[in-house]
Structure formats: structure tokens, C-alpha cells
């Protein structure tokens, strides 16, 4: 179980990096090793994020790509692939759930020596769990009972959360670079400010550190140098930007006041 937890997270992170490198080199650029913003558990208000390894990656392209569409592809497809893999991990993780009656749950966890972690899933993770249940891949929950998910489902939760952070339309995140290409520098500044305030308004305990990080990174404006400096971003890529924002919302953990499940 421990190995599957580490492998689930590693696959999401490595796949995102490899896909990004592929598109950058295909479009004529050379990407650097991405810098993963580290999590500092001491500053997280709730233990639900204590084991989060990173808040996402920042990637700098060392040489200009051909045009803005090519540069947009470098930042778009990497997190999308990360979401797809994390969703697949969530499906597999749902098959590892165990179903307990209320009496069994009390007997096992009532002593206080063992415990579960209640976290709030995203819409995509909830959909993966529902699909696994519909296909009969996860156990049926008896009346008054509860399903306990393995650490592999936690790995899927972390993978989707990292993808959520990557697609935030703020500062130097992949979503912020897509926003700069689609909306311009001024539009990117607006989305950065809106992202920070919305995160704090939705879930203060979990996101105040990300809120501070966004405003620190906002001082560094991304450079979108391309060999073709005249052509604008195509309409199809602008539509993909809107699709990325919808996907980001689907990856966002549902606010803890609405939905939680034990792991």
C-alpha cells in the first residue's frame, strides 16, 4: 500500500514533466527542470494538507518556441495529462476500498489507536468513485456503514490537487502563463488577484498559504517570448484556455463544509 501511494503520486508528477518536455522540444524550445514549490507543513492550518508534497511546478522555457500557439500547448497539455492519470489512479484506488458496518467501524477505530483521515474530494474524484461503484468494482456500503479508502486513493487526491494548483490562472503557474497568452499581461494580473481572493473566500484554513504564495509570485511577470512575435493566440487555443479553467474547477477539492469522506 505504501509503495502504491508513492507510485501513484510519482506517476502523475513525472508524466506531467515528460509531456511538457516533449511539447517544448517539438515546438523548438528547450525546457528546464521544473521547480516544484515545496509544502511547509508547519504553516498549514489543517492536518489534511500536512502530507502534500508540493503546490505545483513552475517551468521556464530556455529558448523561444515558434509561436504563441506552440507555447500555449507546452503549458496546456502537461496538466491535462496529469489530470487524466490522477483520474485513472482514483478509479483503481476506488477498487481498494473496504466496506464496514457501523459496529465494525467502532470496534476497529473506537479504541483511538487507529484513525482515518477525512478529506474533501474534487468533482472528478467523486465521479471516479461513483463510476467504480456503478461498475461493481468497489464494495457496496451497508445501511449505516462506511467505506474506507486506501492510501492509493489519497495519492489520486494529491495528484488532482497538484493539477488544480498547476492550472490556477495566477502568476507563474501553468494556468497563469496560459492566461497571459490568452488575455494579455493586464488580464493575467486580474486573474491572479481574483484567484487569490477566491481561494481565501472559499476555504481559508487550507488556502491562505497558497494565497500568500500567489501574491509573492505575482511580482514576477512571465515572459512569453516566441520567434513569431506578431501573431496572436488562435481562437482554438483561447477555447482550450476556457476548457482548462473548467477542468481546473473539476479538480478543485469541494469545500470541506459540503463533502468529506474517510481515508
Image: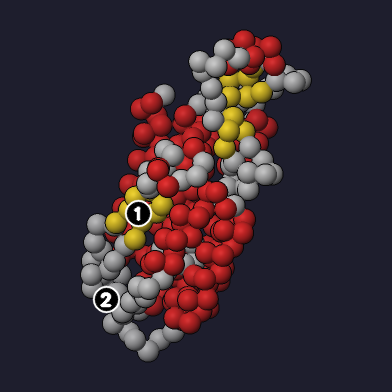
Circle on res. 37? 1
How far is mark 2 from mark 1, CA to CA?
A: 24 Å
Image quarter (top left, top right, bottom left or bottom right) of the C terminus: top right
Q: Nearer the viewer, residue 144 or 241?
A: 144
Q: Is the Cβ of the residue at disc 2 closer than 8 Å to that at disc 1?
A: no
Residue occupying the point 41% across, 75% down: 69
Earlier sequence position, callout 2 versus callout 1 = 1
Coordinates of residue 42 in the picture (x, y in percent):
40, 43
| Residue 112 visible from this viewpoint | yes
Residue 225, quarter of picture: bottom left
Query: Where 169 falls versus 188 (above or below)?
Result: above
Mark 1, other Cα within 10 Å: few <14 / some 14–19 / many ≥20: few
Coordinates of residue 34 in the picture (x, y in percent):
29, 57
* In-image side of 65 versus 188 (left or right): left
Residue occupying the point 52% across, 53% down: 207
Name the residue beneath numbered marker 2.
64
Residue occupying the point 56% across, 65% down: 197
Amino acid at each position: 500500500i505504501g509503495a502504491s501511494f508513492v507510485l501513484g503520486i510519482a506517476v502523475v508528477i513525472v508524466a506531467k514533466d515528460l509531456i511538457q518536455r516533449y511539447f517544448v522540444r517539438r515546438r523548438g524550445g528547450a525546457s528546464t527542470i521544473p521547480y516544484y514549490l515545496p509544502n511547509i507543513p508547519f504553516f498549514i492550518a489543517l492536518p489534511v494538507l500536512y502530507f502534500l508534497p508540493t503546490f505545483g511546478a513552475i517551468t521556464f522555457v530556455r529558448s523561444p518556441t515558434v509561436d504563441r500557439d506552440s507555447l500555449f500547448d507546452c503549458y496546456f497539455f502537461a496538466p491535462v495529462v496529469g489530470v487524466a492519470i490522477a483520474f485513472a489512479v482514483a478509479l483503481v484506488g476506488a477498487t481498494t476500498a473496504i466496506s464496514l458496518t457501523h459496529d465494525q467501524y467502532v470496534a476497529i477505530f473506537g479504541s483511538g489507536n487507529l484513525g482515518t483521515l477525512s478529506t474533501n474530494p474534487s468533482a472528478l474524484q467523486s465521479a471516479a468513485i461513483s463510476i467504480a461503484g456503478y461498475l461493481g468494482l468497489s464494495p457496496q456500503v451497508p445501511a449505516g456503514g462506511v467505506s474506507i479508502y486506501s492510501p492509493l486513493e489519497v495519492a489520486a487526491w494529491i495528484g488532482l490537487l497538484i493539477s488544480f494548483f498547476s492550472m490556477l490562472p495566477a502568476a507563474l503557474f501553468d494556468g497563469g502563463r496560459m492566461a497571459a497568452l490568452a488575455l494579455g499581461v493586464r488580464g493575467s494580473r486580474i486573474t491572479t488577484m481574483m484567484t487569490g481572493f477566491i481561494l481565501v473566500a472559499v476555504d481559508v484554513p487550507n488556502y491562505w498559504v497558497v494565497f500568500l504564495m500567489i501574491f509573492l509570485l505575482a511580482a514576477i511577470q512571465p515572459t512569453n517570448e516566441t520567434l513569431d512575435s506578431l501573431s496572436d493566440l488562435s481562437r482554438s487555443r483561447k477555447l482550450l484556455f476556457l476548457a482548462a479553467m473548467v477542468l481546473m474547477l473539476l479538480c478543485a477539492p469541494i469545500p470541506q463544509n459540503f463533502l468529506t469522506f474517510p481515508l
